[in-house]
């Protein structure tokens, strides 16, 4: 009987693994021959320009995977904060998992959402935006976000409408 709470946690996990063949392979990382660990040191992060679907003023660093293809990825997005960064109404084809590493971000849902309606998140906070849900993002000040999930990652602007992949 002492193991009952553990069984209650493990049973749903086992059902997910059985119900979705290949799930663990979606998360598998290809290691180079002889390697058993993938490391990205904070002082060696390969920052570059954000995708064209995002406003100017941000940088992205791919830590694992590929934003543009199927499979698991982890990326960091950085905003210098010299000017407010506003990502107008958009949606993502898959759930978006975000951890705020530093700074602050505000998120509000709906095509006509306002900054006043936005929920704010600070360093250490984590949230998941549901797929195909129209939302806005505001960043004021230096901020770093880490986004993980299954690709491809896309920020589809409102003018393109809701289209499923």
Image: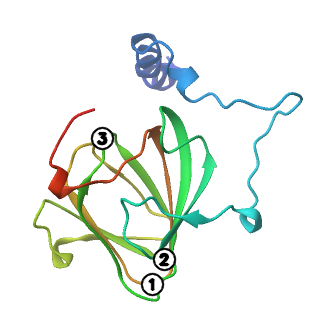
Q: Secondary structure at mark 3?
A: loop
| Camera-nearest residue between 108 and 67 | 67
Name the residue rendered at 15%, 74% in the picture.
Answer: 114
- Residue that sits furthest to the bottom in the current view: 82
Q: How many marks?
A: 3
- Residue 88 in sight here: yes
Q: Earlier in the sequence, mark 1 or mark 2?
A: 2
Asked whether, in this view, residue 149 is left or right of residue 160, the answer is right
Residue occupied by mark 3? 93
Q: Secondary structure at mark 1?
A: loop
Name the residue rendered at 13%, 59% in the picture.
Answer: 110
Quarter of the image where one finds residue 86: bottom left
Q: CA distance from mark 2 to mark 3?
A: 26 Å
In percent of width and height, residue 89 lies at 21, 62
Asked whether, in this view, residue 42 is left or right of residue 153, the answer is right
- Nearer to us of marks 1 and 3 is 3
| Camera-nearest residue between 140 and 18 | 140
Residue occupied by mark 2? 103
Residue occupied by mark 1? 141
Q: Earlier in the sequence, mark 2 or mark 3?
A: 3
Q: Residues within 10 Å of mark 3 (few under 14, many from 20)?
A: many
């Amino acid at each position: 009987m002492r193991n009952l709470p553990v069984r209650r946690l493990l049973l749903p996990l086992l059902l997910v693994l059985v119900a979705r063949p290949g799930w663990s392979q979606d998360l598998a990382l290809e290691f180079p021959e002889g390697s058993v660990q993938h490391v990205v040191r904070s002082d060696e992060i390969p920052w570059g320009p954000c995708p064209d679907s995002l406003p100017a003023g941000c940088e992205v660093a791919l830590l694992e995977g590929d934003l543009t293809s199927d499979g698991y990825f982890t990326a960091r997005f950085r905003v210098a904060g010299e000017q407010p960064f506003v990502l107008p109404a958009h949606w993502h084809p898959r759930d978006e998992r975000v951890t705020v590493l530093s700074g602050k971000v505000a998120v509000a849902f709906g095509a006509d959402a306002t900054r006043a309606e936005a929920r704010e998140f600070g360093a250490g906070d984590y949230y998941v935006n549901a797929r195909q849900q129209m939302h806005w993002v505001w960043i004021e000040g230096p901020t770093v976000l880490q986004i993980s999930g299954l690709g491809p990652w896309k920020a589809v602007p409102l003018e393109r409408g809701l289209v499923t992949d």
